[in-house]
Image (cartoon, grey):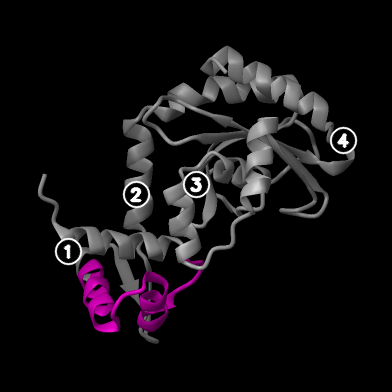
């Protein structure tokens, strides 16, 4: 199979834009990618012309909203909403807390589906919210990510936990965090596989720390995962 190298390089730039938190300069992006400044500039201009990127008056670049539209279309075409909502509703009902599913997106975790809690005091995290890799969902997704995915993250300057930490999460089968993402908020996440050729998702629940029961939450999440996804 003959691949179009110029297209692959533009897609690498697109991935790099998705891995930064704010508009980035040509020089910084070239440093992250290990490429020539002039070449990266041309690739960025191509993405701007195609509507995938925007340029600020300070000559910095960021993703356009087209990326969000395409991402939503990918979820819709895969029928994920219909496949995921029943499990989330069951988990929220069993725990009395908010339940969510997330994917690894660039250097962050993206919430793609969520069912709210009926509690008066609850975690305020919505579909489309982004969380750090240090969240419970982030740690699970890193632990089950392919090694080349981790290498690409590290190449863009993103810090990831040591392999020993990630291996420990895989052995336990879940990750839990207290007051890490937000003070007073705790969460636990387990990996979910929808098929051998699909990336892992993170099934999570979050609650105010003062009523967070880690052992009970993990047991309920594993049961729901078994019921809906076969373990």
Q: Is residue 79 magenta?
A: no
Label 3: which secondary element? strand
The numbered mark, 3 or 1, whose residue comes first in the sequence reads 1
The numbered mark, 1 or 2, whose residue comes first in the sequence reads 1
Can residue 125 be seen here?
Answer: no
Quadrant (top left/top right/bottom left/bottom right) for the C terminus: top right
Q: Residues within 10 Å of mark 1 (few under 14, many from 20)?
A: few
Residue beneath label 2, please?
Answer: 69
Position of residue 83 relative to residue 22, above or below, is: above
Residue beneath label 4, please?
Answer: 211
Residue beneath label 3, please?
Answer: 104
Residue for point 46% across, 56% down: 151
Residue beneath label 1, please?
Answer: 6
In terms of depth relative to the viewer, which is nearer, 2 or 217? 2
Position of residue 114 relative to residue 29, above or below, is: above
Extreme residue toward the right, this view:
210
The numbered mark, 2 or 3, whose residue comes first in the sequence reads 2
Kindly indicate the quadrant of the structure image that contains residue 14. bottom left
The x and y percentages for residue 64 are 35, 63
Please identify, in this view, whether the residue under mark 1 or under mark 2 is nearer the observer.
1
What range of the chain is rendered magenta? 20-48
Please identify, in this view, whether the residue under mark 4 or under mark 3 is nearer the observer.
3
Q: Assess whether mark 1 and mark 4 are in contact (beta carbons under 8 angstroms).
A: no
């Amino acid at each position: 199979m003959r691949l179009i190298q110029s297209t692959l390089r533009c897609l690498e730039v697109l991935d790099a834009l998705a891995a930064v938190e704010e508009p980035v300069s040509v020089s910084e992006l070239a440093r992250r990618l290990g490429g020539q400044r002039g070449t990266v500039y041309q690739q960025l201009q191509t993405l701007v012309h195609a509507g995938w990127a925007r340029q600020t008056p300070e000559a910095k670049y960021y993703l356009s909203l087209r990326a969000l539209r395409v991402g939503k279309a990918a979820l819709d075409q895969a029928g994920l909403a219909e496949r995921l909502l029943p499990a989330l509703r069951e988990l929220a009902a069993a725990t009395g807390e908010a339940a969510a599913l997330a994917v690894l997106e660039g250097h962050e975790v993206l919430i793609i589906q969520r069912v709210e809690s009926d509690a008066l005091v609850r975690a305020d995290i919505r579909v489309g919210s982004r969380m750090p890799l240090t969240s419970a969902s982030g740690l699970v997704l890193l632990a089950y990510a392919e090694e080349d995915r981790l290498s690409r993250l590290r190449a863009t300057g993103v810090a990831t936990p040591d392999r020993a930490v990630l291996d420990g999460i895989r052995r336990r089968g879940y990750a839990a965090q207290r007051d890490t993402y937000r003070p007073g908020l705790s969460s636990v996440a387990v990996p979910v596989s929808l098929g051998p050729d699909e990336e892992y998702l993170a099934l999570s629940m979050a609650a105010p720390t003062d009523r967070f029961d880690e052992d009970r939450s993990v047991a309920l999440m594993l049961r729901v995962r078994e019921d809906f996804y076969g373990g």
